[in-house]
Structures are given as C-alpha cells and as structure tokens.
Image: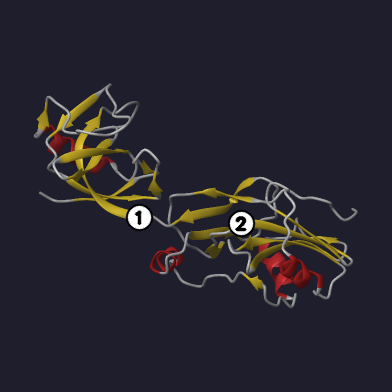
Amino acid sequence: MSFPEWLVPMAATLTYERFAGPEWLFQRKLDGIRLLAFRQGDAVKLYSRTHLPQELPEIAAAVARLPVREAILDGEVEWDRSAYHVFDVMWLDGRDLRALPVEARQAELDKLPLEAPLLRVANLEEPEPWQRARAEGWEGVIAKRRGSPYEHRRSKHWLKMKCEVDKQFVVGGFTEPQGTRVGLGALLVGHFEGAELLFAGKVGTGLDRAMLLELRRRLDAIEVAEAPFTRGVGLPRARVHWVRPEILVQVGFLEWTDHGKLRHPRLLGVAQG
C-alpha cells in the first residue's frame, strides 16, 4: 500500500458507565482540537478531523525532525496551538499499523523521540481514573480496549467518559412508566431562583427497580393538581403527575443546554425523608 493522502480519524463513543479492568487502557480526554500529522520525506501536512489543512509551523517542524521517513500521527492540539498531544500512530516507514492492537501501536509510538511541542499522551494507572479527571478538572477520560485495531469510524473500542457536574434539584413531578418499566418514567426536576421554580429537565436514568417503586410511593403521597414549575422550556404535558416540591435529588449531568436544561442527566441519589 502506498502512503495514504488522508485517513478518517477514529472517534470515541460516549458512555455513562464508570468501569475499569485489565482489558482496557485509559488516557486523559484532552480539551483541544483533533489533529492528524502526515509526514512523508521532508513534507509535513497537518489536518483537522474533517480534513481541513492546519497551518501550525512549530508543530510541523517538530514532526519533520523525527528520525523517520514516513509517519501518520493522531492526537490533539491545544486551543492555543502551543502543544500537540500525540496518542496514536497509524503509519510508520512504509508499515500500515492500523490493524495492530492499540497497545502495539502505543509501543511503536513510544520509540519515537517526541520533543516539545510534541507530547506523548500517557496511560493512566489509577484504579478509577475518572476520579482523578474530576479532581483535576479534566474534560474526561478515554477508555481504549486492549487488542483493538484503529477503525475509521465512531467505535465502541474507544469509549469517552466525560466528567459530570453534580447538583441538587427538587422534584416537581414525574411521568408514567411505559413498556416494562415500573414505578415511574422520569423525574421532572427543577431549581429555585428566588420564589420561582425553574424546570431543568427529565431524569430517567440511574434508577433501579426498587428505587422506582419507592419513589413512586413517596411521590403519590404529595401529588398536587397544578404544576409547581413557574418557568421553563419543554415541560411535558402527557402522562404527567405533579407533586409538591419537597423531595431533593442529587443529579449528575454533563452541562447546561442553551435553554437551561440538563444535558445527559442521571440520578445519583435521593434525599431521605
């Protein structure tokens, strides 16, 4: 195979699970711009993940200084373009490395003498790396399955665990369960701004069967006829029950949407009472 002019970068699949195990490698999820470096002889071309050329002279010069004839590197460049964090190598001196297991590609990358502004993305050794990510304010963690090849698509061999924000909300209602679900469908949660209760969204994940049934029992006891929410976009109207805003829940979520709603919320806990 001749030297590729372009390769679609592998993308990670978002997961809400938190797991570890010997079959996975973990790395920091960097908050930057995806960058692929194509080195052939003295020529270096840099591209974004959508194949847009990137003009980064210092990074291109550092790639050109590597003691190889050909290389295709994958990584993330910082927003200020000051450093290129390399986490994979797809091609090296006429060898197509994409079918190799990820740990073998990392071993090949380890042999390259990367010098600033090129930086090697290290594997994390913590038993629960997402805890370090949260403590140090990272965007998240990438889990890479050992033995997996480099795929030109969004793959479940790479999973991204984004760091959550957690906050306490008040329950103002719930929806009826559907299908085989019991108890309730989703909690309708909000937060107070002064005397107003703002609707923040629906929380339907993170509840097991026992919690669903116990919450339904508690919520039935405080049901009211009118919605307690005074502001908010997207308040559901079908199969809804309203309750007095008395029960507090801890919710993990990735971020706020432009409409003041929770993005990818999940229940972390319920206040007793």
Q: Considering depth in this image, is 210 or 42 the residue closer to the camera?
A: 42
Q: In the rendered image, which quarter is residue 22 located in? A: bottom right
- Residue type of the residue flagged with mark 1: Val
The residue depicted at 29 percent of the width and 43 percent of the height is: 208
Q: x and y percent of residue 6 in the render?
A: 79, 50
Mark positioned earlier in the residue sequence (2 or 1): 2
SS for dot 1: strand
Image point (23%, 43%), residue name: 211
Q: Which residue is mark 1?
A: 165
The answer to whether residue 66 is above or below residue 209 is below
**Picture quadrant where residue 224 is located:** top left
**Does 173 sit above or below residue 50?**
above
265 or 206, nearer to the observer = 265
Q: Nearer the viewer, residue 9 or 42?
A: 42
Residue 261 shown left or right of residue 148 in the figure? left
Mark 2 nearby-residue class (10 Å; few <14, some 14–19, many ≥20): some
Q: Which mark is residue 33?
A: 2
Residue drawn 74% across the image and 78% down it: 113
Query: What colour scheme governs how the chains and residues are painted in the rendered image of this protein?
Result: secondary structure
Q: Of residues 16 and 170, which is closer to you in this image?
A: 170
**In the rendered image, the vertical position of residue 95 relative to residue 10, given as above or below:** below
User: Which amino acid type is marked by label 2?
Assistant: Ile
